[in-house]
Amino acid sequence: MYATRPIDSSANMPTIQVQWKGPNGSGPEWVPLKQDWSERWCTLPDRFTNEFALRIRDFETRSSDVFLVTFMKSGTTWMQELAWLLLNQLDYEAAQSSYAMVRSPYLERSILYPDAPDSIARCDKMKDNPRLIKSHLPAQLLPEQLWKQGRKIIYVARNPKDVVVSSYHYATGLNYWHGSFDKYVDEFVSDKIPYNPYWAHVIDFYRMRDEENVFFVTYEEMSRNLQDVIRRLSRFLGCKELTESEMDKLLNHLSFKNMKESKYGDQTGLLKALHKSDDDFQFMRRGIVGSHKDELGAENKDKIDKLTCTFLKKYGLSEADIFGVI
Ligand code: PPS
């Protein structure tokens, strides 16, 4: 059902690549995107066993579920806060008394953190209605029922150069990864970082963006015009239209400054308590579009641009078609 192959990576955990294995390269037939899935592999810790993959595939969904899917460091937490508030009648009191990662659990979390409680069981037992479940898995490894039952999926994408910068700081700050920035970029472009390959992850959802149950949005759109994203997302989720004052309050709550300053908006404290982190680790770092411009360096930028051009050429797309001009 799933094929795996070991790979050599500098991640602080043994890593494998996982593939959904249908006959003759056919993918999971429940995913609406028809393509040769034998080209799709996903780099994951080796704890992502066949048994774990099958438990995720067979995860029981509910009609009110909303899944939030992203490649890591793409604005997941920002969107979790937004979507959770829309789904919970703007309950700021609850939002200001617990972390987004507690209110909106991470489906496959226990494969990344061996000592963590079983994250699939936790999502399964959740009493919240609706559930907002986070995952970084690519389309082909997500629960079958998401597609078969048309469950709502929010997908957030962010440009790869800012993702690399953000994830490098995260991975080194939490000691998942040791090595130079240049080495990290080399591993990212050769698909050795967990959840790689980046572009396959993004493009499969981009090509499914017109599916009725998929809301595809970018971090860049959220940064440019959050109000418009909130309006569209609210309609997608079937929530009531916000009044002007509700909108102003929500925009204010979601600003980088306010989330960073609030105890539960920024997950730095929780992550530091859970992991062996560097003293200066910050989860909410800069929160801007284009942080790569003064952090990545020309050579690394070229490596990622080359990866982007080669991949997107096959689809007749450019990076700006997806993210706008950065
Ligand atoms: S994770 O760990 O994969 O779930 O991380 P994720 O939440 O996807 O991404 C973290 C980056 O999102 C930024 N962020 C924000 N940007 C703008 N506004 C708000 N409110 C906001 N909240 C989180 C966060 O700062 C990380 O980006 P960088 O570039 O590292 O600052």
Image (cartoon, rainbow, N blue to C red):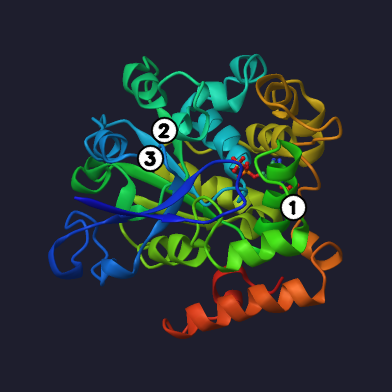
- What's the CA distance linking mark 2 and mark 3? 12 Å
Q: State ligand 1's quadrant.
A: top right
Residue at 63% x, 40% y is: 78
- What's the CA distance linking mark 1 and mark 2? 28 Å
User: Which label sits on residue 121?
Assistant: none
Element carrying mark 2:
loop
Residue position for label 3: 48
Spot occupied by residue 246 in the image (x, y as percentages of width and height): 64, 32
Q: Are marks 2 and 3 in contact (CB under 8 Å)?
A: no
Spot occupied by residue 278 in the image (x, y as percentages of width and height): 81, 33
Residue at 65% x, 73% y is: 304
Mark 1 or 3: the one toward you: 1
Some atom of ligand 1 lies within 8 Å of the CB belonging to the residue at label 1:
no
Mark 1 or 2: the one toward you: 1
- What's the CA distance linking mark 1 and mark 3? 24 Å
Disc 2 crowd rating (10 Å Cα; few below 14, some 14-19, many 20+) is many
Residue position for label 1: 179
What's the residue type where badge 1 is placed?
A: Gly
